[in-house]
Amino acid sequence: MASLAEIRAKLKEQESRASGGGNGSNGPNPIYPFWNIKEGESCTLRFLPDGDADNTFFWKERLMIKLPFAGIKGETDSRPVQVQIPCMEMYGETCNILNEVRGWFKDSSLEDMGRKYWKKRSYVFQGFVTDNPIADDQAPDNPIRRFIIGPQIFQLIKQALMDPDMEELPTDYTAGVDFRLNKSSKGGYADYSTSSWARRDRPLNDEEMNAVNTHGLFNLTDFLPKKPDETAQKVMHEMFEASVDGEAYDADRWSQYFRPAGMQARTGDPQVAASPQATAVSQSAPVAPEAAPATAPVAEAAPAPAAASGDANDIRAMIRARQG
């Protein structure tokens, strides 16, 4: 029989998951949740350079793979959960999971499954929020915040940088420009396609410059998931196979490596002892809700989400048959 302490820990864990992992408006959040602005509202951001002078860009790209599980093993009232793991291509290495998923797109009956497990791109920026419509947003003492930007907004940023009419870097302290992020909806998804750069440059004000001088700039690489070691990579592939097979998430085997948001790592020895380098990246890899998806997959680009078709068991059987 479980002890009282174990029961309390389990209840606390379930409450945390039910509330989204405690990442709401309960305290200052260094990540600005722009996705919480209401439809028809706007916020204004001012991007800053990366603290890493060797980074050509003022952002860092993140590549994550989402693994859905039917529930949590051993929990009778468990609902479906999702765990994020890093794609090894983010570190300039071959991703064995993507290599397997890539082959699924050669079979039209497996494309939907392939899209589900394809890498998801997002981009980490930093800067100031100069116009904030979120009433209950609590800014930290350091006003330099991080932004997790999805592909739709990133393309708008990228297109403007390639425009010859933009003469200065938008992150320049004296000749930079603000970015106006507008939220609407399209097809049931959040849509930010009308967002744009300000037409006039604006130098950072005294308060903003003081924040830069006092707190300094973040090194954006520090906010990417830690590169998994060899053991963690084996765990990632094991979790991937379990997810594809429709299994439940096994906290005893995997929680010291990767776990759903809000779950605490289980104590005791898992089947394979945790490596000192293995970390639960799902706890440090928030992802903004997706904007309206694209309409068709591209071989190397992130394939668009699509409605599931066919029986899941039949699809998994076809995948295993192809592997055999």
Image (tube, rainbow, N blue to C red):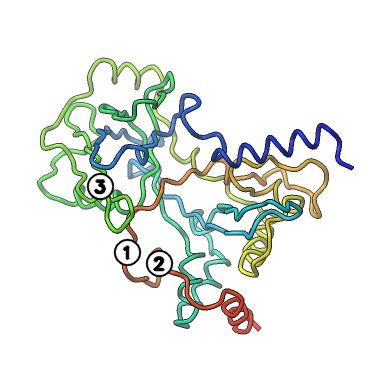
User: Residue at (34%, 26%) from the top-left corner?
Assistant: 135
| In-front residue for pair 48/241 | 241
Q: Mark 2 against mark 3, which lies toward the viewer?
A: 3
Where disc 2 sits, the SS reads: loop
| In-front residue for pair 68/219 | 68
Amino acid tagged 3: Ser
User: Residue at (71%, 46%) from the top-left corner?
Assistant: 256
Q: Residues within 10 Å of mark 3 (few under 14, many from 20)?
A: some
Image mark for residue 294: 1
Where disc 3 sits, the SS reads: strand
Question: Quick one: label 1 or label 2, which is nearer the N terminus?
Answer: 1
Residue marked by disc 2: 303
| In-front residue for pair 294/232 | 294
Query: Disc 2 vs disc 3: Cβ atoms closer than 8 Å?
Result: no
Vertically, is 214 above or below 293? above
Residue 301 sits in quarter:
bottom left
Residue marked by disc 3: 184
Amino acid tagged 2: Pro
